[in-house]
Image: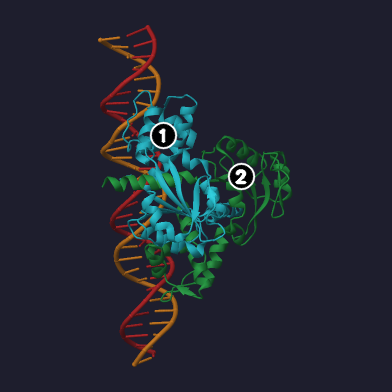
Chain colours: A cyan, B green, C red, D orange
DNA sequence: AAGCATTTGTGAATGTTTTCACGAACTACA
DNA sequence: TGTAGTTCGTGAAAACATTCACAAATGCTT
């Protein structure tokens, strides 16, 4: 029902609204929100019309109510269990990234194939070997897998995750994964963003 | 000229093509490429028609030639200088991320406000304080800024980057930045991707 | 050299997303 | 209560993106 673009924007609106809440601002109009995000007000009204809560004509939206609806829609009203695959530099950065815990995402398992890493402890989570994954997914209620291994290993661990019953995967390895239809996959490729930037720089240089 | 969606796909095509090259495959049809990426062949032909090199009817595209054109379009034929702002966990992961160097992106400056970090050395790059940024951008030919600081500090460092003349910014802080029109900005918010996943999980659960 | 089998490149058709524009809902104040 | 001033929600229009479908280009076989 909600399309991809809308969801992406809802996430951003939610961020801004939470910032407003901290600053004790309790109402905002679509016009103001749009200005803050360089979007048209009608875009914002259209997007928000897809979540439950309605704005009030002549006034705008109530920050608190809207956050509540957005948290509901975006699945932030409950905790989610994560398994981190890959305990390298990137894996560690993700594990300790404060934004996850804040929104209810908990790393409950950390997997790495490197024997020198297995057994180490990160804030109470012990790093274990790949063959423990299936068991951990069941026991620790893992909802999502986060892949932070080198490209070569990515396909295999993705397969293991899916085999263990995980239905959502966030892939940081720079390789497109081919997973079953019913697994929701997002690919966050750091170098891809960079290439996007350089492509634009190139284009503007030409002008 | 090239639109956002097309660029995003071109980056992916380039990845796949480079993989094919490694495996000594020298030709590919739009049909095959489409299958590999779950895209229609006409989408791929349309996208590729926007880069210089033409395919050959009855044969397909030549991998090597196509990579060459894509590298050109995506700005991968030259080196780019990066400044990393923020030497925390995420900053370190980005700095040591192998994908960047491979595609010609070089971190030439690392900035952090924490006195205990200033003076440390990461693979030959010394961590320096924020007030050195302007000078470094000039001296080290910095093309892009990579922001990996906590939200509170993000706006300010973004402003400093822009003030120093940087025209492209990759923002990892979970806060929307408001930069001048002529600065190209990309926002990679790790928690945002996660929220996207949980939103989808929620939606499918409901059905 | 001719005919068949591929596959490209691209107008035209279709589908999707965003913006426009305006009636209806609400507030504020006299 | 009435009037003026906001702002929302949403059909309809416009802009944008994808897919279809087919002529033209090429390779392969006889």
Label 1 environment density (alpha carbons within 10 Å; few <14, some 14–19, many ≥20): some
Image quarter of residue A202: bottom right
Image coords of residue A94 (percent x, y): 52, 48
Q: Is any atom of residue B169 visible in this view?
A: no
Image height of A143 relative to D23, above or below: above
Q: Residue at x 61, y 44 (%)?
A: B88
Left or right, A10 with reference to A189? left
- The circle on residue B126 is none
SS label for mark 1: helix
Q: Is any atom of residue B93 visible in this view?
A: yes
Q: Which residue is mark 2?
A: B88
User: Which is more toward the observer, B98 or A111?
Assistant: A111
Image quarter of residue A73: top left
User: Which is more toward the observer, D9 or B107?
Assistant: B107
SS label for mark 2: loop
Image height of C28 relative to B105, above or below: above
Q: CA distance from mark 1 to mark 2?
A: 37 Å
Report the label total.
2
Image height of D27 relative to B168, above or below: below
Q: Which residue is mark 1?
A: A41
Mark whose residue sits in front, 1 or 2: 2
Image coords of residue B169 (percent x, y): 58, 46
Image coords of residue A99 (percent x, y): 49, 41
Please give the chain letter of the residue carrying mark 1: A
């Amino acid at each position: 029902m909600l399309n991809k673009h809308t969801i992406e924007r809802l996430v951003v609106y939610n961020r801004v609204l939470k910032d407003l809440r901290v600053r004790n601002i309790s109402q905002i109009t679509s016009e103001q929100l749009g200005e803050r995000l360089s979007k048209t007000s009608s875009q914002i009204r259209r997007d928000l019309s897809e979540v439950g809560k309605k704005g009030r004509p002549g006034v705008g939206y109530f920050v608190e109510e809207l956050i509540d609806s957005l948290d509901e829609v975006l699945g932030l009203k409950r905790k989610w269990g994560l398994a981190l695959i890959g305990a390298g530099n990137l894996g560690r950065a993700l594990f300790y990234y404060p934004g996850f815990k804040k929104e209810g995402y908990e790393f409950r398992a950390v997997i790495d194939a490197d024997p020198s890493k297995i057994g180490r402890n990160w804030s109470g989570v012990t790093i274990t070997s790949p063959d423990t994954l299936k068991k951990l997914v069941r026991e620790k209620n893992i909802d999502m897998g986060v892949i932070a291994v080198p490209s070569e290993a990515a396909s295999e661990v993705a397969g293991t995750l899916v085999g263990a019953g995980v239905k959502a995967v966030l892939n940081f390895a720079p390789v497109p994964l081919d997973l079953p239809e019913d697994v929701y996959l997002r690919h966050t490729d750091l170098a891809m963003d960079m290439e996007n930037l350089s492509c634009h720089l190139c284009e503007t240089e030409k002008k």
